[in-house]
């Protein structure tokens, strides 16, 4: 829990009386009622979610360790962190005041995210009016959305937003704050498909000339929980007229749902983004499906927050996949949460003699701030805040590299450069 891996945790599932992500998805899809898990009302649901954040941020005591479990009091400013008493609150204030405003946004987005599950977020989007290479980030993307304020206003005034604040146990924020929260969550939703689109551009892979296959390696509940067949359709708006794209989600924690269907053995349908999945390790998928032609080899491999830097056990689990990606010279794009994670990941990749062709800040990083669960008084992290691009082993003389005019950001680090700092490679 001390690690920067935001998302639906097993702690939250336990509080909701659920055993797995499949239970949570069944409840969200209506296949099981909330009462099956002891949740009878919307108020119960939001309170159980909030219970997972109830501990004294100063002394770390949980409610059960206090003489009166109800004595925990929430910070009135951020509506996020809790204290067991005035003494702990005063002791923690010099640290907490540095993060209080940002943690207020975290708490707000955590609640408004429910509207992603109800279908209110994201709002319908339009075909891009600019070429993909001219869209430099979210400001450009939002500028292409017609009637943006009307779309945001409809969500703010909608039935589920009203239900949310009638049952959240917190005062409803101003409409302007809710609009900004919706915008942040829209970027969080579209960050993955647009990051994939960025990867295609960086490697010079053109969706307009041929059908493409993208493997999302290390996929988990984060990429697949409640995922709809249309969730990556922003790629069609990004590349109108494309020849077809298949996104294959591969990972041991892939959640059962609409996209749990076998990869295509034929080309992806023209003009469509087709989602499929495989529950298991990537090197096993490669042997059982790619080598036997039950699935197409990838034009691009993407890993969102692989986390192999976090501990030796995770690295050991990732090692066969990392070596496979290197030895087959597959174009690979990994994303990370922070500069600290970027530096640690680069160090490992350099030691594996992987050819790192670039790394930089991601112009399509999520704008939604997320906190470390057990230590909220730290700088927030952002999904896919940076990317690393890989291609095979260390550079071989005569190999064509990505040119500056390909839109590339970043550079190739040496072991000494990684050890000393990452600033020169950041775009």
Image (cartoon, rainbow, N blue to C red):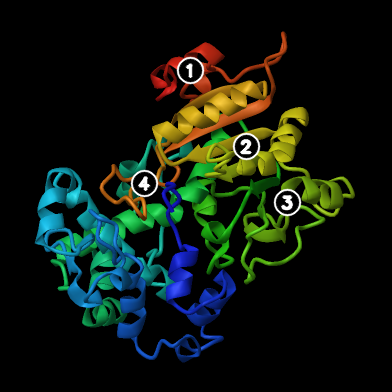
Q: Are marks 1 and 2 in contact (CB under 8 Å)?
A: no
Distance (Cα) linking label 4 and label 2: 20 Å
Is 327 placed left or right of 205 in the picture? right
Q: Are marks 3 and 2 in contact (CB under 8 Å)?
A: no
Callout 4 environment at 10 Å: few (<14), some (14 to 19), or many (20+)?
Answer: many
Vertical placement of residue 93 versus 269, above or below: above
Q: Are marks 4 and 1 in contact (CB under 8 Å)?
A: no
**Which badge, 4 or 1, comes first in the chain's sequence?**
4
Q: Are marks 4 and 2 in contact (CB under 8 Å)?
A: no
Specify the label residue 206 is tagged with: 2
Q: Circle 4 sits on which residue?
A: 141
Q: Circle 1 sits on which residue?
A: 419
* Quadrant the N terminus occupies: bottom left
**Which badge, 3 or 2, comes first in the chain's sequence?**
2
Distance (Cα) linking label 3 and label 4: 35 Å
**Which badge, 1 or 2, comes first in the chain's sequence?**
2
**Which badge, 1 or 3, comes first in the chain's sequence?**
3
């Amino acid at each position: 829990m001390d690690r920067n891996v935001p998302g639906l945790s097993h702690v939250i599932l336990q509080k909701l009386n659920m055993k797995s992500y499949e239970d949570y998805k069944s409840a969200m899809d209506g296949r099981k009622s909330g009462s099956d898990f002891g949740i009878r009302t919307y108020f119960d649901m939001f309170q159980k979610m909030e219970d997972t954040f109830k501990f004294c941020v100063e002394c770390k005591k949980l409610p059960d360790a206090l003489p009166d479990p109800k004595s925990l009091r929430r910070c009135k400013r951020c509506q996020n962190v809790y204290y067991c008493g005035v003494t702990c609150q005063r002791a923690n204030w010099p640290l907490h005041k540095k993060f209080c405003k940002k943690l207020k946004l975290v708490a707000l987005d955590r609640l408004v995210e429910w509207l992603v599950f109800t279908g209110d977020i994201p709002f319908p989007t339009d075909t891009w009016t600019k070429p993909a290479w001219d869209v430099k980030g979210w400001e450009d993307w939002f500028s292409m959305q017609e009637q943006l304020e009307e779309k945001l206003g409809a969500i703010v005034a909608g039935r589920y937003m009203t239900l949310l604040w009638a049952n959240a146990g917190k005062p409803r924020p101003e409409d302007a704050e809710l609009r900004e929260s919706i915008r942040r969550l829209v970027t969080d939703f579209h960050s993955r498909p647009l990051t994939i689109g960025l990867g295609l551009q960086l490697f010079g892979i053109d969706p307009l000339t041929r059908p493409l296959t993208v493997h999302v390696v290390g996929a988990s509940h984060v990429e697949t929980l409640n995922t709809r067949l249309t969730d990556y359709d922003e790629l069609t708006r990004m590349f109108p007229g494309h020849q077809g794209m298949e996104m294959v989600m591969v990972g041991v924690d892939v959640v059962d749902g609409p996209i749990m269907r076998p990869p295509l053995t034929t080309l992806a349908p023209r003009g469509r983004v087709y989602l499929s999945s495989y529950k298991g390790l990537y090197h096993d998928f490669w042997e059982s499906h790619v080598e036997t032609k039950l699935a197409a080899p990838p034009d691009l491999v993407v890993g969102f927050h692989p986390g192999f830097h976090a501990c030796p056990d995770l690295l050991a689990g990732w090692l066969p996949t990392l070596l496979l990606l290197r030895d087959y010279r597959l174009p690979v794009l990994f994303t990370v949460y922070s500069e600290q994670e970027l530096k640690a990941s680069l160090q490992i990749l350099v030691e594996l003699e992987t050819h790192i062709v670039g790394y930089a800040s991601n112009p399509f990083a999520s704008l939604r701030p997320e906190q470390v669960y057990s230590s909220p008084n730290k700088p927030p992290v952002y999904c896919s805040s940076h990317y690393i691009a890989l291609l095979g082993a260390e550079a071989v003389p005569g190999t064509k590299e990505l040119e500056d005019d390909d839109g590339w950001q970043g550079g190739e680090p040496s072991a000494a450069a990684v050890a000393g700092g990452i600033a020169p490679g950041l775009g």
